[in-house]
Amino acid sequence: MEDFTYAISTRVYFGKGQIRNLGRNIKQYCDKILLVYGCGSIKANGVYDDVVNELNRSKVEFVELSGVKPNAKLPDVTEGVRLCRENNVAGVLGVGGGSVIDCAKVIAGCAAYEGDAWDLISAKARYTKILPIFTVLTLAASGSEMDALAVVTDMTRNDKLITGSNMMLPKVSICDPTYTFTVPPQHTAAGAVDIFSHICEPYFSADESAYVSDRIAEALLKSCIHYASLALSEPENYEARANLMWASSLAVNTLTAKGKNIGWSVHEIEHTVSAYYDITHGVGLAIITPVWMEYVLNETTLPRFVTYGLNVWNIDPKLEAMEIARTAIMKTREFFAALGMPGTLREAGIQEKTHFGEMAIKAFGPEGRTYSFMPLTVADVKNILEKSF
């Protein structure tokens, strides 16, 4: 088991009516914020009114950035930075799902930087000052409400990059499962896949010594499997929405990765897909994950797949090891299909393979990735994309 340091400073208010804690907590850090949100759903479902009423009650001034697009686009970040500077705001509040919160986090990180925001996002420069970040979560998916990372896309470069800093951890996150009752089925499903993938990335490691982390991961995976379908069939089932929301936060706040030597693969491959084709992140993950699993399954990786099959999917332990592994992969694919996810990139609307070669290089660089569960070359990544098509 590897050595580690673990510190999550985000204060989470979880449950019904927790919005009442938003204003007074923001007030402890600043008097004026940038309010960041998406294309209008929070106004239709009443979340916007709840937020504004709470800000007004606590006498927190705000400037608005609305219309933030999926996959957290660079122009939205740039506009948010402009608003922060011109209006002298001292904090950023993201109200929405992962794209909105990621956008808010990066705005907060770039507001005090005099250069181009992409310098920070691409790690050409380092974050030195980040405005305090607050979130109100409306979609169980990315876990951005409780981690120190964000993902931003520049469609002009076909780049989707992970960026972050320990200073990017939100100060306060409001997680009210009732705010997810009106999430459309396709977004609920894609969010569940994102949660599932966040757990799988560190879980699929050659390191078998981090027993506690692995058992936590398996419990989260089983919870995701159980409650995703329930949330789809009963959108206002509080138990289902609450468990998915908490699984979302725990999946990617590094809890399940502690004590392990890991290297994420599926997310990096999918990021290149959505950077070129702007598809929903969870949809891309649903397509690529089973293909990646099949591709990396061999005698070396077999033990982890067997553990996955036995402990997550409850497959008969009397079966041969390779049959257990293949059945587990099949069940993973069937789970995503049952959620309504497409099975191929073509089904997701991608009709050509022109960019797969350059996408493979962008995923891990020209040298590939040697430190992941299964080392992958550029040729391997291209093959995975081809098999996903």
Image: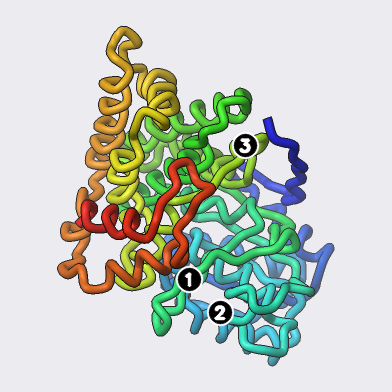
- How many angstroms separate mark 1 from mark 3 (CA)? 29 Å
Q: Position of residue 190 (x, y in %)?
A: 35, 51
- Sequence-first disc among 1 and 3: 1
The residue shown at (53%, 40%) is 202
Dot 2: element? helix
- How many angstroms separate mark 2 from mark 1 (CA)? 8 Å
Residue bearing mark 1: 72
195 displayed left or right of 107: left
The residue shown at (74%, 40%) is 4
Q: In front here: 367 or 304?
A: 367
Residue bearing mark 2: 77
54 displayed left or right of 24: left
Give the quarter of the figure containing the N terminus: top right
- Is residue 105 something one can see in this rendering? yes
Give the quarter of the figure containing the C terminus: bottom left
Q: Which mark is residue 260?
A: 3
Q: Nearer the viewer, mark 2 or mark 3?
A: 3
Dot 1: element? loop
314 displayed left or right of 373: left
Q: What residue type is disc 3 on?
A: Lys
